[in-house]
Amino acid sequence: MWKKWFAKKPAKNKIYDTVERDKMPQHIAIIMDGNGRWAKGKGLPRAFGHRAGVESLREIVYTAIDMNLKVLTVYAFSTENWKRPEDEVNLLMRLFSEYIDSEVEDMHRKNVQIRFIGKLDELASELQEKFEKTQMHTGKNTGLVLNLAVNYGGRAEIVRSVQIIGEKIARGEMLPQEITEMSIHDNLYTADLPDPDLLIRPSGDFRVSNFLLWQSAYTEYWFSDILWPDFKPNHLIEAIIDYQKRERRFGGLKK
Ligand code: FPP
């Protein structure tokens, strides 16, 4: 798979040769930021930026598939994004729906398991149904797990986990002293997945914006000025190469 992927790349593009295939991150998370600024810079309405952002996502997903990545989690809409003008929120919801219509079948053929994480019950019922159908349709696939975070907030996810635990305690199925890091982890959306090894935030801001707060305790961050619609597979490779140079100690000492 790797060989096939590298073979497609121009021979003189040395960046691909520098990736160490035995040190690949298992889980990459991306904050797809900068769509609005990209459009503004071109004198276009913000909607164009979001549409261009969908194109970037497509390329990155296919690169992730070719690289045999295990998990890719992308931040598509946060619990705070409802504060945006109604037109923009409606456009984003429409894009999610169109994305499913146009992309799911191809991804399914590529063995991608598509999941949606976030407070999905607050979305329009037609969109919820589409998400549900997509998850069912691709649920047995064994390739890349693509998590699309929609109406997602890291704090809300932790609260939800604690509420599930609280309900168990109220029913007498668990004792308060049995609340541990593991039990909180076990009730997150990503409970069955490895934590992100690498979190990429393009477009110049240095913050985590309520994304995967619990899971990113030891995640490596990679920031860049590139706006999401300009983010290409080369940038992903660049981030991975940078990640591979780092020493992860998880609170321990240098080896
Ligand atoms: C942040 O850029 C981006 C978003 C809030 C939406 C991300 C959505 C997409 C990439 C397209 C749709 C996704 C799917 C899954 C179909 P911003 O608008 O905050 O940009 P700005 O900071 O430059 O204003």
Image (spheres, rainbow, N blue to C red):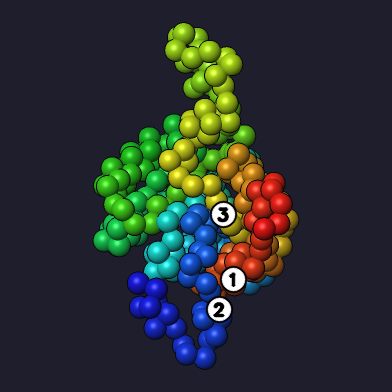
Question: Hey, what amino acid is under mark 1?
Answer: Ile
Q: Residue at x 30, y 45 (%)?
A: 139
Q: Secondary structure at mark 1?
A: helix
Mark 2 belongs to which amino acid? Answer: Thr
Q: Position of residue 223 (x, y in %)?
A: 68, 62
- In the image shown, does 183 or 228 lie closer to the viewer? 183
Q: Within 8 Å: ligand 1 and the Cβ of disc 1?
A: no
Residue 245 lies in quadrant: bottom right
Q: Which mark is residue 18?
A: 2
Where does label 3 land, which residue?
197
- Residue at 40%, 64% in the rendered image: 68
Task: Say whether residue 45 is visible.
Answer: no
Q: Between marks 2 and 3, how big is the CA–CA gap? A: 19 Å
Query: Which corner quadrant of the figure contains ligand 1?
Result: bottom right
Position in image of residue 221 (x %, y %): 66, 57
Res. 177 in view? yes
